[in-house]
Amino acid sequence: MREAIVLAGGFGTRLQSVVSDVPKPMAPVAERPFLTYLLDRLGRYGYGHVVLATGYLHEKVEDYFGHEYHGIAIDYAREMSPLGTGGAMVNAQQHCHEASVTVLNGDTLFDIDHDRLCRFAEEKSTALAIVLRQVPDAGRYGSVEVDGDSRITAFREKDPSAGQGLINGGIYRVERSLFDGYGVGQPFSFEKELMQQRYLNERYYAYADGAYFIDIGIPDDYARAQQELPTL
């Protein structure tokens, strides 16, 4: 059975001007929580168990979904204090059973082929596989570089003048062993303190996918989601 972790504990500071009474992944899009669009896609690709890593206004998520959503078993890994993305993943993995899980950001919809992601991670025999997205303004996010074998060779910091490039799309296929040495409740950034510190010595891989991508973290893109997501 496929398992996934969705990071759904963000404060949504940049979205506070338009959505303030629910956590960012629960922001309404065409009268449905944004998170339902993510879960619908996971269900289509055979994910039978999803752990929602919650924090800020966690009760809003738990009251809406309960422990089952359209055939997907739902569990919760609640943060009592901010753990960062890495700490949230370690906390959530306590509820997982498989050796490998898919991790997604709860405020981003990247409509990838999850069958391809799982095959790619297996073929590369890697503890970490990342899906990248080509965007015209990579400087907003920071970019990622890979070599001819799809191995990650560089992470570039945010740079407003960067222009077009490949960004981390916020979807990972990870092995449980990736977090060996990290304790439950230990706050850390998955991106900065694990990926960007280890990639030169470890073999982490990534590939680009041109699927639909939207990050609702800022009001302009949140407004765009209202029109685009219902038509996907």
Image (cartoon, grey):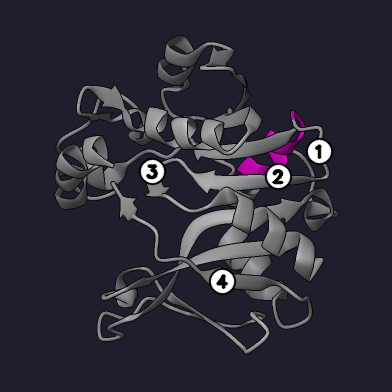
Query: Which residue position holds label 2?
Result: 101
Decide which of tag 1 and tag 3 comes sooner along the chain.
Answer: 1
In space, the residues marked 3 and 2 are separated at their CA atoms by 19 Å
Rate crowding at label 3 as few (under 14), some (14 to 19) or many (20 or more) other CA atoms within 10 Å.
many
Rate crowding at label 2 as few (under 14), some (14 to 19) or many (20 or more) other CA atoms within 10 Å.
many
User: Where in the figure is residue 72, as x and y percent of width and height?
Assistant: 59, 21
Left or right for 49, reference 66: right
Query: Which residue position holds label 3?
Result: 107
User: Where in the figure is residue 166, as x and y percent of width and height?
Assistant: 43, 76
Query: Which residue position holds label 1?
Result: 98
Decide which of tag 3 and tag 2 comes sooner along the chain.
Answer: 2
User: Where in the figure is residue 198, as x and y percent of width and height?
Assistant: 72, 74
User: Where in the figure is residue 37, as x and y percent of width and height?
Assistant: 38, 33
Q: Kindly check if marks 1 and 2 are in contact, taking CB atoms under 8 A apart as contact.
A: yes
Depth check, mark 3 against mark 4: the one in front is 4
Label 2 secondary element: strand
Q: Which residue: 39% across, 48% down?
A: 108
Depth check, mark 2 against mark 4: the one in front is 4
Q: Amino acid at mark 2?
A: Val
Decide which of tag 3 and tag 4 comes sooner along the chain.
Answer: 3
Label 4 secondary element: strand
Depth check, mark 3 against mark 2: the one in front is 2
Rate crowding at label 4 as few (under 14), some (14 to 19) or many (20 or more) other CA atoms within 10 Å.
some
Q: Kindly check if marks 3 and 2 are in contact, taking CB atoms under 8 A apart as contact.
A: no
Please give the range of residues in magenta.
87-95
Query: Which residue position holds label 4?
Result: 207
In space, the residues marked 1 and 2 are separated at their CA atoms by 7 Å
In space, the residues marked 1 and 4 are separated at their CA atoms by 23 Å
Label 3 secondary element: loop
